Image (cartoon, grey):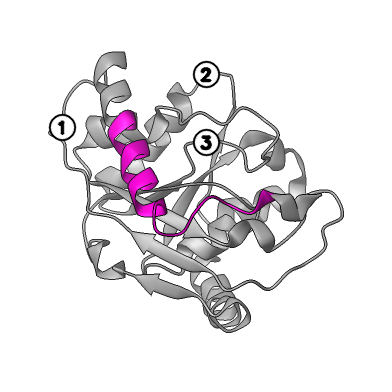
Amino acid sequence: MNLYPLVDRLTRPLMNRAYKIRHVNAERVPASGPVVLAANHESILDPWFLGTVTPRPVHYLTKSELFRYPVLKQVLEGLGCIPVRRNGDMGRALDAGGDVLDRGEVIGIFPQATCMPHRERPFRRGAARLAIATGAPLVPVLLVGTERSIQPRTHRIGFPQVTIVVGEPLHTERGEPTREAATELTDRLEQAIAELRRPYGQPDHRWFD
């Protein structure tokens, strides 16, 4: 069952209203064809924020631990999420993501893999590997303010104004996603998001304390 249209129809207006979401350059997200949206990761609510930047359904690469729970698994599969084993074999997840892109659809991915500020959060190469393997444009997206939407330990809800800034798509020719090619494109992605971040300053993770 495809739950995405129903969930999107219910949550998008609520998210926009509650967080007064401001979209900057959202027209840079292609209206058709395969796309990899890659964003910084500051909150467990980031998939809902990122989804508001395009009217198109977004398939998220999601940590596989969440698929252990039968009801949640059904919901995640209904939303088109793709399980990923962190620190494990990425091949199966990338193959599934490649199939989604080959159908001309949208993948959403958070290359930092975690929103917890006390952990090491280097940008990983999965988004770049997908873009290279399929020739899909890699679109850098900056999420501003989402770190204050929910505390990870107390789950206290906040209602900051959220700004979502879309960068220029990074284009690459379809080819073999070698380690060197994926590293180079990942570096470009990280630099692009850092440049988008410059006018806004760093995330306010002190709110977690």
Instruction: Indicate the position of residue 185 as horizontal and vertical percent values.
Output: 27, 30
Occupied quadrant, residue 118:
top right
Identify which residue is drawn at 33% across, 31% down: 186
Badge 1 is on which residue? 174
Occupied quadrant, residue 18:
bottom right
Instruction: Indicate the position of residue 87 as horizontal and vertical percent values.
Output: 59, 20
Identify which residue is drawn at 23% across, 31% down: 132
Asked which secondary structure carries label 2, the reply is loop
Badge 2 is on which residue? 89
Do labels 1 and 2 touch, CB within 8 Å?
no
Q: In this view, does 107 lie to the left or right of 176?
A: right
Q: Disc 3 versus disc 2: distance between alpha carbons?
A: 17 Å
| Nearer the observer, 65 or 121 | 121
Q: What stretch is highlighted in magenta?
A: 186-205
Q: Characterize the magenta stretch by its predominant secondary structure.
A: helix
| Nearer the observer, 101 or 156 | 156
Q: In the displayed structure, would residue 187 be above or below residue 115?
A: above
Q: Is residue 111 left or right of residue 136?
A: right
Q: In the displayed structure, would residue 10 be above or below residue 101?
A: below
Magenta-drawn stretch contains 26: no
Q: Disc 1 versus disc 2: distance between alpha carbons?
A: 22 Å
Q: Can residue 53 be seen in this view?
A: yes
Asked which secondary structure carries label 3, the reply is loop
Q: Which amino acid does label 2 sit on?
A: Asp
Residue 112 is marked as 3
> Who comes first in sequence, dot 1 or dot 2?
2
